[in-house]
Amino acid sequence: MDVGLKIKIKRKRDDAMLFMLIDMDYFFAACEELKRPELKNKPFVVGTSPESQKEFGVVQTSNYVARKFGIKSGMPVTKALPLCKELIYIESHDDYYESISERIMDILRSYSLPMEIMSIDECAIELGEISTDEAVRLGNAIKERIKGKIGLPCTIGISSSKIYSKMVCDEAKPDGVKAVPADQIREFIKDKEVSKIPGIGPKAAAQLEGIGIARIREIADKSPMLLMEKMGSLGTFVYNVARGTDESGIQHSDQLSIGRETTLISGAGTESIDAAIERLAEQTVSEVERRKMMFKGISAKVRYSDFSEKIRSANLKNYTASKEILVRKSKELIADLIKGKQVRKVGVRVYALTDASGQNKLFY
Ligand code: TTP
Ligand code: MG
Ligand code: MG
């Protein structure tokens, strides 16, 4: 088979599209410090098990004080404890971290730029063709806003693709803003280990080692055909990353959307779920009104007790800003998703927005 035909090697772009990657610093641990400031400057970990069974838990994260002792995410707690005598153990509070995450994402949404939520503490934003200086100014403003409104530090990486922005962010941690423009990115990544490329885990790193590659620059010297034979599409991906020609962008949600979610008390019945939907619809519609808009698309989400999630959507015939329509449609969609299952979270969202005069609005 002639695999060569399938290889897509990218050329450098002429334009200067920039991306931003925001990642919260020591997120779960920083959230705990917000509630308990006395933890600051003491080494502690956040773990998966209750305190009384901490030896069965895994370290989800630790503050930077604990990291100095070599403590890392994913480490069994039994391995972390001997590394630091004074190590404090805190049991994880997932719903609390999620509510903070939602507030952070709401702040980021308020900039009306195309964005993709990458994880509970991480978001990629497409900045368009702006100068590096402007991007850094915006980065600092976003950082200040999150610090001011939530009280937590984050780090922001800016570069010519989503992947490069993440790598820049990793290097600028903690509490940093750093930009590496397209023409400097190859130099920036060349001496790093291949495992610093997001998406390259231990297995892919071992495959690369098998063909004599340890550093990113060594990938760029290899034949892309060989990389593809050994690693499939991941081979093409790392080849492009190494040559400074990665163009990974954000996944567009194609339109701006507005919505709200809420966590339910355990065992919530139809009545309290309906009340929650009404509240969420009201908050959503008042945000739509505040922006002087109308919507045509409605989506509803549930999270089941096993943390899996499902979304259902519906399109209306006409634009509206009616709370009643949103409530009725959301209830139908959510009832369809629940079907007797236990749910711990529901969400209501509207999309396909237009401004209230009926004119389509382009956000980006
Ligand atoms: P990360 O952003 O990877 O790490 P972090 O925010 O704790 O620290 P950093 O300053 O280096 O960004 O992960 C975000 C949260 O996700 C983290 O606080 C806890 C959780 N998490 C786990 O539960 N298990 C894991 O193995 C990792 C890596 C993270
Ligand atoms: Mg983080
Ligand atoms: Mg993260």
Image: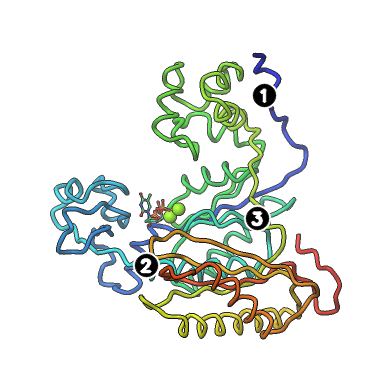
Judge the density around disc 1: few (<14), some (14-19), many (≥20) Cα neighbours within 10 Å: some
The residue that mark 1 highlights is: 7
Q: Which mark is residue 223?
A: none
Q: CA distance from mark 3 to mark 1?
A: 33 Å
Q: Nearer the viewer, mark 3 or mark 2?
A: 2
The residue that mark 2 highlights is: 31
The residue that mark 3 highlights is: 135
Mark 1 secondary-structure assignment? loop
Q: Residue furthest front?
A: 340
In percent of width and height, residue 319 lies at 79, 75
In percent of width and height, residue 53 lies at 16, 59
Q: CA distance from mark 1 to mark 2?
A: 44 Å
Looking at the rendered structure, the kind of residue marked 2 is Cys
Judge the density around disc 3: few (<14), some (14-19), many (≥20) Cα neighbours within 10 Å: many
Q: Nearer the viewer, mark 1 or mark 2?
A: 1
The reply, left or right, for residue 267 in relation to residue 113 is left
Looking at the rendered structure, the kind of residue marked 1 is Ile
